[in-house]
Image (cartoon, helix red, strand yellow):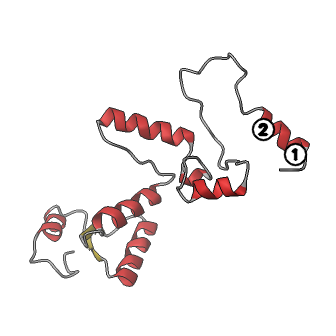
Amino acid sequence: MGRAERLGTRVVRAARVLPAGAGLPLVPPLVQSVAFDHPRAADQDAVFAGDRPGYVYGRYGTPTTAALEAALAEVEGAEAAVCFVSGMAAIHAYVTGCALAGRGRVVAQEDVYGQVRAMLDRMRHEQGADVVYVDPRSIARPRACSTSKRYRTRSCA
């Protein structure tokens, strides 16, 4: 470090720790910060790279998110749970990690949310993803498009 921290830095850091002997809260505190401080840039880099535990930026997780994930895993009897900061992040993770990992087919309704459609169209164009849009008013078409080998074209709608 070498040089003294400025007043603003000292004030922000002073409010982070509970006074000694204060006890632990029964409910974990909500961490609303989107940025996390580390003593050295190398420490932050190690956390960011996944080489050591910790937090860097809210998009990649916070103590509050970790507590929610642990609670959800416990309730569901699962090994782990993953939470996302947005619906689009969750949809993208599912489509790329589950549906397309085995080169599966994505069947979506024609009037799906615009950004989801844009993402699926981009994946279809750039990665050759098998994406089919169907009329949401017909139960038979989505079922046929997702299970029948007969429907290997994009004409399931």
Using the rendered view, name the quadrant where residue 118 is placed: bottom left
| Residue 109 x, y percent position in the rendering | 29, 66
Q: Which amino acid does label 2 sit on?
A: Arg
Q: Mark 2 points at which residue?
A: 13
On residue 5, the disc is 1
Q: Residue at x 54, y 38 (%)?
A: 64
- Kindly report the distance in space between the C-alpha atoms of the residues bearing marks 1 and 2: 10 Å
Q: 143 or 25, which is in the foreground?
A: 25
| Residue 12 x, y percent position in the rendering | 79, 39
**Height in image: 91 above or below 6?**
below
Q: In this view, does 11 lie to the left or right of 22?
A: right
SS state under label 2: helix
Q: 136 or 24, which is in the foreground?
A: 24
Q: Is residue 71 left or right of residue 13?
A: left
Looking at this rendering, what residue extends furthest in the front direction?
2
Q: Residue at x 62, y 38 (%)?
A: 31
- Crowding near pointer 1: few (<14 within 10 Å), some, many (20+)? few
Using the rendered view, name the quadrant where residue 98 is placed: bottom left
Q: Residue at x 68, y 57 (%)?
A: 42
